[in-house]
Image (cartoon, rainbow, N blue to C red):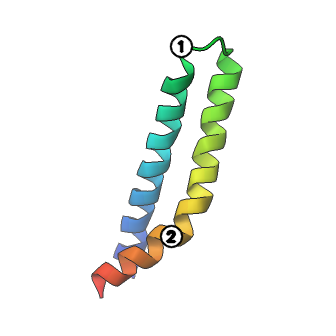
Amino acid sequence: MKNIALQSAFIFTGVSLLAAVIFFLATLPGKYTAVERFGGSVWVFILSMIILMPVVIPIVKRRHS
């Protein structure tokens, strides 16, 4: 069980981090302040974590069983 939780955490954290980086890079050409870029990236990261946690965990459990 611990292996499933750890693997799930790596997956949804990695995907959320990737989404935050993509958001940050997408805002570079615009005229946004650093606070807006970093704040938006944090917001995207948090929302992605909330959305992906209940989705990724059952998928990983199914693959292990």
Instruction: Using the numbered discs, state the Cα–Cα distance from disc 1 to disc 2 in whole angstroms.
Output: 32 Å
The percent position of residue 51, horizontal first and vertical second, equals 59, 61
Q: Nearer the viewer, mark 1 or mark 2?
A: 1
The percent position of residue 58, horizontal first and vertical second, equals 45, 78
- Which type of secondary structure does the marked residue at label 1 adopt? loop
- Where is 63 relative to 6, above or below? below
For the residue pair 32 and 46, the one nearer the viewer reads as 32
Pick whichever of labels 1 and 2 is earlier in the sequence.
1
What residue did someone put label 2 on? 55
Badge 2 local density, few (<14 within 10 Å), some, or many (20+)?
few
- Where is 18 relative to 23, above or below? below
Q: Quadrant of the N terminus?
A: bottom left
> Quick one: which residue is furthest to the left in this view?
64
- Which type of secondary structure does the marked residue at label 2 adopt? helix
Q: Amino acid at mark 2?
A: Val
Label tally: 2
Mark 1–mark 2 CB contact (< 8 Å): no
- Where is 6 relative to 43, above or below? below
Q: Which mark is residue 29?
A: 1
- Where is 62 relative to 55, above or below? below
Is residue 58 shown left or right of residue 24?
Answer: left
- What residue sits 70% from the left and 21% below the top? 35
The percent position of residue 54, horizontal first and vertical second, equals 55, 71
> Quick one: which residue is furthest to the bottom in this view?
65
Q: Quadrant of the C terminus?
A: bottom left
Q: Amino acid at mark 1?
A: Pro
Is residue 38 shown left or right of residue 24?
Answer: right
Is residue 65 shown left or right of residue 30?
Answer: left
- What residue sits 54% from the left and 27% below the top? 24
The percent position of residue 50, horizontal first and vertical second, equals 62, 59
- What residue sits 53% from the left and 62% below the top? 52
